[in-house]
Image (spheres, helix red, strand yellow):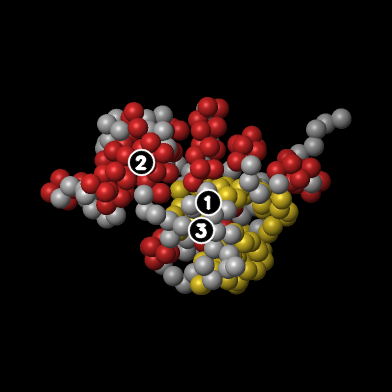
Amino acid sequence: MTPILELQAVTVSFDGFLALNQLDLKLEAGELRAVIGPNGAGKTTFLDVITGKVRPSSGQVLFKGKPLIGKPEHHIARLGIGRKFQTPRVFEKLTCRRNLELAVAKGSSPVKLLLKPLTIELRERVQQLLLLVGLGAHDQQLAGGLSHGQKQWLEIAMLVAQDPELLLVDEPVAGLSDEETIHTAALLKELSGSHTVLVIEHDMDFIRDLQAPVTVLHEGHVLCEGPMDQVQADPRVIDVYLGREED
């Protein structure tokens, strides 16, 4: 079976610095995968390559067996790859519901929505998304008044509204409370299966809650992969990322 995403020997060089170095990685359809690694490991560049923001010096990126390199960012997004950045990108002066209405309408403006309201099917889709991320009771609240965690969930819902097959989620729990972190892990687990979800994060408790395979990046390549317990016990990961306790 063809992986939904495959990076083959991807190298990215910035003025001689290897941000990615012969990086190989595969994701199967419906998989939930966590990616961790120290600062400078290449995590952001890795996402930039997939989404077309950065063109690699060498190597290949395949989505459902077809090459992505050279395609513009908007074309890659239309193929079914959605990216959530670390800082929530929502329309703060609009309500949660209106944010999602714009997302499901795909390209409509608030003015167009006033002139041509959503179909019953799309209105039901908005309601489903609000309930999915736990914002059903906040549908008429301005997005700017939400907590940081709620803004993250709203943006995830807006991303899901675009029906991507692959979700790339960058540090979704940075600055969240413990309760919000637990909710975010549960949400991403629920989204996997119907979507392929790749999550980059530093919070080890959150990664453990995901109960997903973990890929560790170091100096632009895969250091190791496996279940969280196995990765945490790997001496190489301890040395370069997790650190050792003082005797």
> Mark 1 or mark 3: which comes first in sequence?
3
The answer to which image quadrant residue 11 occupies is bottom right
Q: Which residue is mark 1?
A: 193
The disc label shown at residue 48, or none: 3
Type of amino acid under label 1: Gly
Residue shown at 66%/52% (left/top)?
Answer: 215
**Residue 162 at x, y percent in the picture:** 37, 53
> On the rendered image, what quadrant is the N terminus found in?
bottom right
Residue 82, above or below 64: above
Q: Whole-Å distance between the Cαs marked 3 and 2?
A: 30 Å
Which quadrant, please, contains the C terminus?
top right
Please tell me in which quadrant of the rendered image residue 80 appears.
bottom left
The mark lying in front, picked from 3 and 2, is: 2
Give me the disc on residue 128: 2
In the rendered structure, which disc, 3 or 2, sits on the residue that comes first in sequence? 3
Task: Name which residue lies at 50% across and 30% down.
Answer: 180
Is residue 142 among what the camera can see?
no
Visible in this render: residue 80?
yes
Q: Nearer the viewer, residue 161 or 125?
A: 125
